[in-house]
Image (tube, rainbow, N blue to C red):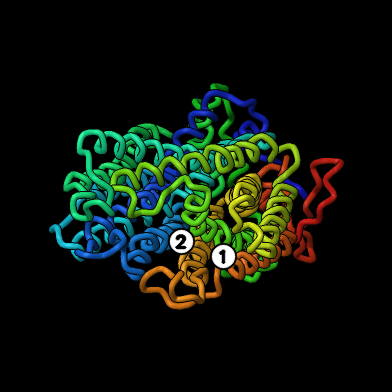
């Protein structure tokens, strides 16, 4: 049986789109801008790091990072992110969203700057410093996932909540573009100021000493947008749902939201007291009641995010093969170090501009029209189709005349990842769990995703290596090859479709309806979820 809603929460649910919504999107989104900027720009500078610190006299090709160093540099941030998602997700429910929000941003600012510093100039010292600060950078980024999603969901109205949360996540697209553009500008400026011959003409002179500043500047620039939004994060009031439903302070919730919404709201402390007496809404994360009501939901959000990130992050491993195949990036030995950075940045920026960014904003446009469930199912379906279409006739795509078609289809997998599960797996966990567990459950779901990213980034880094020793990257064992790796990715995407069936549709419903916080248990201990739209027939396990 449904119970009455607090006036302050109802006011948020029915509020028209206002300026504070867009302010919240920008303030929350800057964390994701920094996240994407960092993950994108490290892939731009790893080849430069190899040239600077792992050059071997007399080698036919420029120096590259050894497999274990490459894995550490690229993956240590993922490990930090996973830990940060779990820790800050839990802390956000214990201390409040606002108190923890500033910590994550400041950690990101400090570690972005520190990533460009080194203790010593020897390869081991530089890589150890870089990995140390990238772990803690990832730890801060990890905290931004559950907190930004939860804050945006609790501020938004129920009509456009999906679009607002997806818009926060879509700031990643601008971060990717910014990473590419900064790398293009910095490498072009240094290339013009310090001309150098190609590696094949003069291996030692092809990497000028000033190139060491390039990768540091690119990494450190990520601190700037995050630092600019710190003040505004500290000015944001705590969300009304946390203040009222978790902290039980109705007066403060009404006061905060009166200023935000610019309307008079009644505190209603007597309702808070009555709500506290209702049984059935005080269960913990590890209780039987949570498993009964939300066990399948949490299984659905964790598994779909895990499977999505295996496919999504491993896709990035094939970019260098594609860029070389269509002639965007010539062989490394025909370029100097700064030219290589410039070419890689230009190519990856084009891919982002043409497929990645549009996918994010298609989700923003359609998520509150066709729903999260439909977008996620459609995204996994088309990712499966395009992966199999690339993998089964893989030999056909390797012929020069067919390579443009390969790139188009490959770009479409990126498009449907972003206009699909990459966005919806972020949105849904911020909507369907109770306020006192919302941040924790989102953190758990996101951490499962980062575990998938680690599997994708490293499992497939090794798996995609050819069996032919002459074609493998130096230092890697034999793998199953790119064709078989793509087939495995297609199967993983198909599994994602299956587990999507466990995730409820949250379009057009209030957060309290979705989490059953505005429902009473009957004498049998069951909770009834009441439908809110005549055309919404999806069953929701509770």
Mark 1 is surrounded, within 10 Å at the Cα level, by few (under 14), some (14 to 19) or many (20 or more) other residues, namely some
- Whether label 2 touches label 1, CB < 8 Å: no
- In the image: residue 531, left or right of residue 383: right
Q: CA distance from mark 2 to mark 1?
A: 13 Å
User: Between residues 140 and 125, which one lies in front from this camera angle?
Assistant: 125
> What residue is shown at x 61% (from left), y 47% (from top)?
404
Label at residue 285? 1
Q: Secondary structure at mark 2?
A: helix
User: Between residues 488 and 277, which one lies in front from this camera angle?
Assistant: 488
- Which of the two labelled residues, at mark 2 and mark 1, occupies the earlier sequence position? 2
> What residue is shown at x 66% (from left), y 55% (from top)?
278
> What residue is shown at x 66% (from left), y 34% (from top)?
365
Query: Does 442 appear above or below 193?
Result: below
Query: Does 95 appear above or below 22?
Result: below
- In the image: residue 330, left or right of residue 198: right
Where's residue 429, x and y in %? 60, 53
**In the current view of this chain or complex, which residue is farthest to the left?**
120
Query: Does 101 appear above or below 82?
Result: above
Query: Does 344 appear above or below 285?
Result: above
Residue 409 visible to an observer of this rendering = yes
Q: Secondary structure at mark 1?
A: loop
**In the current view of this chain or complex, which residue is farthest to the front?**
201
Where's residue 186, x and y in %? 29, 37
> What residue is shown at x 53% (from left), y 23% (from top)?
19
Mark 2 is surrounded, within 10 Å at the Cα level, by few (under 14), some (14 to 19) or many (20 or more) other residues, namely many
Where's residue 14, x and y in %? 67, 31
> Which quadrant is home to the C terminus?
bottom right
- In the image: residue 517, left or right of residue 200: right
Label at residue 342? none
Pair 2/1: label in front:
2
Label at residue 86? 2
């Amino acid at each position: 049986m449904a119970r009455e809603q607090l006036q302050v929460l109802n006011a948020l649910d029915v509020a028209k789109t206002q300026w504070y919504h867009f302010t919240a999107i920008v303030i929350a989104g800057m964390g994701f801008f920094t996240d994407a900027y960092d993950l994108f720009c490290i892939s731009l500078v790893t080849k430069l790091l190899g040239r600077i610190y792992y050059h071997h006299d007399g080698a036919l090709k420029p120096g590259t990072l050894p497999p274990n160093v490459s894995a550490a540099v690229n993956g240590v941030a993922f490990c930090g992110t996973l830990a940060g998602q779990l820790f800050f997700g839990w802390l956000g429910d214990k201390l409040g969203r606002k108190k923890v929000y500033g910590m994550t941003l400041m950690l990101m600012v400090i570690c972005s700057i520190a990533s460009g510093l080194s203790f010593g100039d020897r390869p081991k010292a530089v890589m150890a410093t870089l990995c140390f600060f990238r772990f803690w950078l990832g730890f801060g980024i990890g905290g931004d996932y559950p907190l930004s999603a939860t804050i945006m969901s609790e501020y938004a109205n129920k009509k456009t909540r999906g679009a607002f949360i997806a818009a926060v996540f879509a700031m990643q697209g601008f971060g990717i573009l910014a990473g590419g553009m900064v790398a293009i500008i910095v490498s072009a400026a240094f290339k013009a100021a310090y001309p150098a011959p190609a590696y094949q003409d003069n291996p030692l002179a092809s990497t000028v000493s000033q190139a060491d500043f390039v990768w540091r500047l690119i990494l450190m620039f990520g601190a700037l947008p995050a630092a600019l939004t710190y003040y505004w994060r500290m000015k944001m009031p705590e969300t009304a749902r946390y203040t009222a439903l978790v902290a039980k302070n109705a007066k403060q919730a009404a006061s905060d939201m009166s200023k935000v919404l610019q309307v008079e709201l009644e505190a209603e402390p007597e309702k808070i007291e009555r709500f506290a007496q209702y049984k059935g809404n005080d269960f913990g994360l590890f209780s039987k009641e949570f498993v009964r009501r939300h066990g399948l939901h949490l299984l659905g959000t964790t598994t779909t995010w895990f499977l999505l990130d295996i496919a999504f992050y491993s896709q990035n491993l094939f970019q260098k093969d594609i860029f070389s195949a269509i002639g965007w990036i010539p062989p490394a030995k025909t370029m100097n170090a700064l030219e290589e950075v410039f070419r890689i940045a230009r190519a990856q920026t084009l891919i982002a501009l043409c497929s990645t960014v549009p996918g994010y904003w298609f989700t923003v446009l359609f998520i509150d029209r066709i729903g999260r469930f439909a977008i996620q199912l459609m995204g996994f379906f088309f990712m499966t189709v395009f992966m199999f279409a690339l993998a089964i006739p893989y030999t056909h795509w390797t012929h020069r005349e067919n390579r443009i078609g390969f790139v188009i289809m490959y770009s479409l997998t990126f498009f449907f990842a972003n206009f699909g599960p990459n966005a919806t797996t972020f949105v849904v966990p911020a909507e369907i769990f109770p306020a006192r567990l919302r941040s924790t459950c989102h953190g758990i779901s996101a951490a499962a995703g980062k575990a998938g990213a680690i599997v994708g980034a490293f499992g497939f880094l090794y798996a995609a290596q050819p069996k032919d020793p002459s074609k493998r990257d130096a230092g890697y064992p034999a793998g199953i090859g790119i064709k078989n790796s793509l087939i495995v990715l297609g199967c993983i995407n198909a599994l994602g479709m299956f587990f999507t069936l466990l995730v409820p549709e949250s379009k057009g419903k209030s957060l309290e309806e979705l989490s059953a916080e505005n429902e009473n248990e009957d004498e049998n201990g069951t909770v009834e979820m009441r439908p809110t739209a005549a055309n919404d027939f999806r069953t929701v396990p509770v």
